[in-house]
Image (cartoon, grey):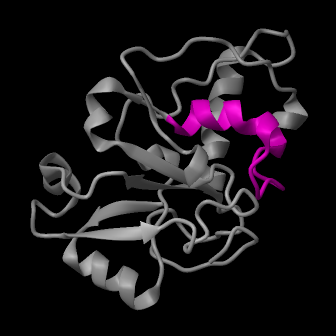
Amino acid sequence: MILYKYVSFKTAVSIVKNSTIGFSCLEDLNDPFEGASVHFEDNGDVPTSLAANAVRNRMSRKFGVLSLTRTPLNPTMWSHYGDDHRGVVIGIDVEAANLNSSKTSLVPAKYGDVIYSSTIPTKQLPQLSTEQLMAIGNEVESFEEQDYELFKRTFLYKSLPWNYEEEVRVVKNINSHSSSRYSESNFENKSGV
């Protein structure tokens, strides 16, 4: 499967020259729905709003998101992400780039279709214990079916007006990444380079 990334010419040169691509933190994504679909049942152990905020915070700091699209010829995408029509669209074979692997991605491309909705989902997830909340991102390196609903709610919901993007996301663990989320750097962990 080929997915696409709209970038500036300068970024495209860097991607091709270095065979690398950047992942973003949850809090750097631009839709108000980002991470807002996380709601927990009240079990009395941890207040639900505190649990939801803790999950969003840990998810943003421990996981990186690569946003790709199914369409290389969308004029709105060119305007928003392709440096006002002066940039480049790079086609990425997700199999060859190891972005479809359930062993190296928490959300591989094959499970990363963004869900566009006019309302934020409110169905409550089972409450996590304090220990489970603190463990988010510590050891998880690969896709695990029992965690998919939480990752889907955190990373794969966007508001309906963004549906023109036809977005597919890949989520990887960046836990061993020690520099600032605003700096450019290379790192390697079990999820890859």
Q: Residue, x 87% and y 27% (percent of image)?
A: 129
Q: Residue, x 80% and y 19% (percent of image)?
A: 127
Q: Where on the picture, by quarter, is residue 47?
A: top right
Q: Residue, x 48% and y 60% (percent of image)?
A: 1
Quadrant of the image containing the C terminus: bottom right
Q: In this view, does 143 lie above or below 115?
A: below
- Image location of residue 96, percent across then percent down: 56, 74
- Image location of residue 46, percent across then percent down: 80, 19
Count numbered badges in the picture: 0
Q: Where on the picture, by quarter, is residue 128?
A: top right
Q: Residue, x 45% and y 75% (percent of image)?
A: 184
Range of magenta residues: 134-156
Judge from the rendering whether residue 181 lies leftward or rightward of residue 9; answer left or right. Answer: right
Q: Where on the picture, by quarter, is residue 53?
A: top right
Residue 140 lies in the magenta stretch: yes
Residue 171 lies in the magenta stretch: no
Q: In this view, does 131 lie above or below 14?
A: above
- Image location of residue 30, percent across then percent down: 35, 41
Q: Which residue lies furthest to the front in this view?
A: 1
Looking at the picture, tell me which residue is in the foreground, 22 or 102.
102
Judge from the rendering whether residue 4 lies leftward or rightward of residue 190; answer left or right. Answer: left
Judge from the rendering whether residue 49 lies leftward or rightward of residue 82; answer left or right. Answer: right
Judge from the rendering whether residue 100 lies leftward or rightward of residue 20; answer left or right. Answer: right
